Image (cartoon, rainbow, N blue to C red):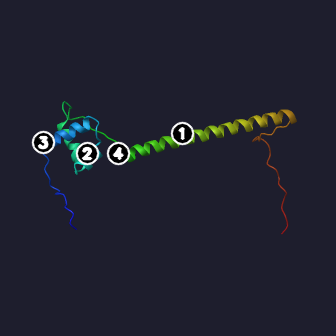
Amino acid sequence: MNERKLNKNRKFSEQIRRKVVKEFRSGKYTVIELSELYHCSDVTIYRWIHKYSPGDSPQVNVVEMSKSADQKVKDLKQKIADLERALGQKQIKVDFYEKILALAEEQYDLDLKKSSSSRPSSGSGRTKR
């Protein structure tokens, strides 16, 4: 209960704003880290970057991926790698089965592959109840 709450309508001096932008542009901190360090929102930091970035035209947008987005990209890349590996293993199995079929057809002189031109089997017929 004795915790002191920060004033939501604080004003940062231009000197501090420029310092924050300089720290971001140097790569020392991310926007999220700066917002936590200075106890302000990341939107505020982005506004300062846009306003105080030297020599940048107003059309330049600062884009930074958050940690969760970075992790999501890594997870998706890992999933792609796993799926490609599984696909490769399945393809090896398919090639193996096709080779076995070819060898069996050659050795036993049989046509083991199904052809669509053959008649379906009549089955065992109707059974009595």
Residue 15: image x %, image y %? Answer: 13, 40
Residue 94: image x %, image y %? Answer: 69, 38
Question: Which quadrant, please, contains the C terminus?
Answer: bottom right
Above or below for 72 versus 106 = below
- Frontmost residue, 61 versus 9: 9
**Do the residues under discs 4 and 1 have CB atoms within 8 angstroms?**
no
Amino acid of disc 4:
Ser
Spatial CA span between label 4 and label 3: 26 Å
Q: Which residue is mark 2?
A: 34
Residue at 84% of width from left, 32% of height from top? 106
Q: Secondary structure under badge 2?
A: helix
Spatial CA span between label 3 and label 2: 16 Å
Which quarter of the picture shows residue 2? bottom left
Mark 3 vs 2, N-terminal side: 3
Spatial CA span between label 3 and label 1: 48 Å
Q: Which mark is residue 81?
A: 1
**Do the residues under discs 3 and 2 have CB atoms within 8 angstroms?**
no
Spatial CA span between label 4 and label 2: 13 Å
Q: Which residue is mark 4?
A: 66
